[in-house]
Amino acid sequence: MPLRRLLLTAAIGCWSAVWSLPAAALDDPVARARVTRLDNGLVVVTLEDPSTPVVSFQMWVKVGSRDEAGYTGLAHLFEHMMFNGSKHLGPEQHAELINARGGEVNAYTSNDQTVFHDDVSRETLPLVIDLEYERLAYLDISAKTLDRERQVVLEERRLRTEDSPMGRLYETLFATVWTALPYRTPVVGWRSDVEKATAEVCRKFFSTYYAPNNIVVVITGDFDANDALTRIERTLGKLRPSESIPRNPTEEPEQRGERRAIVHFDVNGPLLAAGWHAPATGSPDGEPLDVLSVILSDGRSSRLYRSLVHDAEVALSAAGGYWEFDAAGAFVAIATVRPGMKIDDVERRFFAEIERVRREPVSEAELDKAKRQIEVGLVNGLGTSHALAERIGSDFLAFGRIRPLDERLARIHAVTAADVQRVAQKYLVDDQRSVVHLVAPDPEQPAKGRGGT
């Protein structure tokens, strides 16, 4: 699922301490990161940190659902295929070897990238490097392996999307917000594409995108960088680069008027979602939109939650925020309607809050609180090897560099109430919004299609 720029999980009790701490006083570990580019184009970022006994190895592949042409779901399918065996290892043996040594291994796919991560002890790092080389060099992409993993992916799609009201809501919302950009397609893919993709199609996709010149490896924690680089050069350094890595050239046409969609699903309480076009990653409007996200729809103190859930008691939940991608962005807000309440009444109150933030400047108290939340989230990203590696990898893929923490804190600190109102007026426009209602089917209508769109 695409993703908020920040994970704001810090405790409120830390706010005042972080807010008062000058950015320059913070020790930003990534300033000590070392970037190495091998002859085959592989980028390796290493950050030694002996203060933690954990080593985080992350492999960031610059391929997501936006890169798929012809068959959707291939990027996500390969997240699974990468664990399904290679020339010298059977299915799931990669993960079993790491888990047997006390490590943790996992992966995820988004619209713009696929990430594989291992958190292990120092002595297990050489094995991790060898295992990554094994599956990149010798992955089993046979019809038998594909058919086995295809069923796993189809079951995941059924559970998380087809049988999930929230999954259906998001899938319809993004297919409505974008009419041309590939962000309109679900990361898990459309069922028909996953069912029909052949081994030949998969092999071509793998050789194109799982190439060293399309990968960033990040290693952080307690390890010897020179030893790791020597081993990487001896293994991953032998991989052949891709001659061409195509990117989707499509641009989204201007939206000229509100769009609406209705999804029928057996639910007790309807769901309401709205999405507006927003800028891509790296926009100077990103920080004001992050602050607006917190004020409007992040947590129990946010405006939408207070208005819909606490005050009027017409909704069970309300949340949302700014979602940014490499080529576009969206501002999303969602509400779960309380059973027995009318979705149209919730929508009126919902959009009244949107209009209020466009019409009136937010208070200084709201502004300060939101900025503190975001700053604490950023500082908490220094706490573990895994978080540091994730920050390095996401920055390097998006910007080609690692943004210093003091730069990011300064940009948040500089956001004013006028900035928040400006981006609300610029992006949260009625003619630029898409609205989705997920409601129970009409009992008077034929039962065909219940449980879906």
Image (cartoon, rainbow, N blue to C red):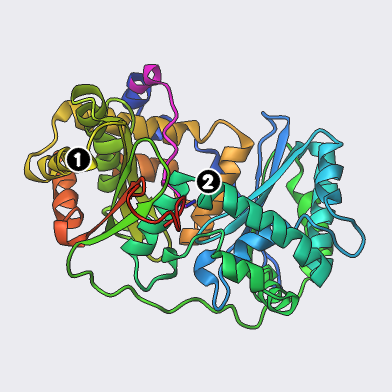
Quarter occupied by residue 71: bottom right
302 vs 212, nearest the viewer: 302
Quadrant position of the C terminus in the picture:
bottom left
- The residues colored magenta run 2-15
Look at the picture and state if 413 lies above or below 398.
above
Q: Nearer the viewer, residue 123 or 158?
A: 158
Q: Position of residue 339 (x, y in %)?
A: 31, 31
Q: Which residue is mark 2?
A: 391
Residue 194, image x and y in percent?
63, 67
Measured as percent of width and height from the top left, residue 326 is found at: 43, 63
Left or right: residue 298 compared with residue 394: left
- What main secondary structure does the magenta stretch of the protein show? loop
Extreme top residue here?
A: 13
Q: Give the amino acid type for the residue marked by disc 1 in the picture.
A: Phe
Query: Is residue 9 one of those drawn in magenta?
Result: yes
1 or 2: tag closer to the N-terminus? 1
Snapshot quadrant of residue 278: bottom left
- Of residue 257 and residue 246, the one placed in the foreground of this image is 257
Marks 1 and 2, how far apart at CA: 34 Å
Q: Is residue 410 visible?
A: no
Per the image, the residue denoted by label 1 is: 350
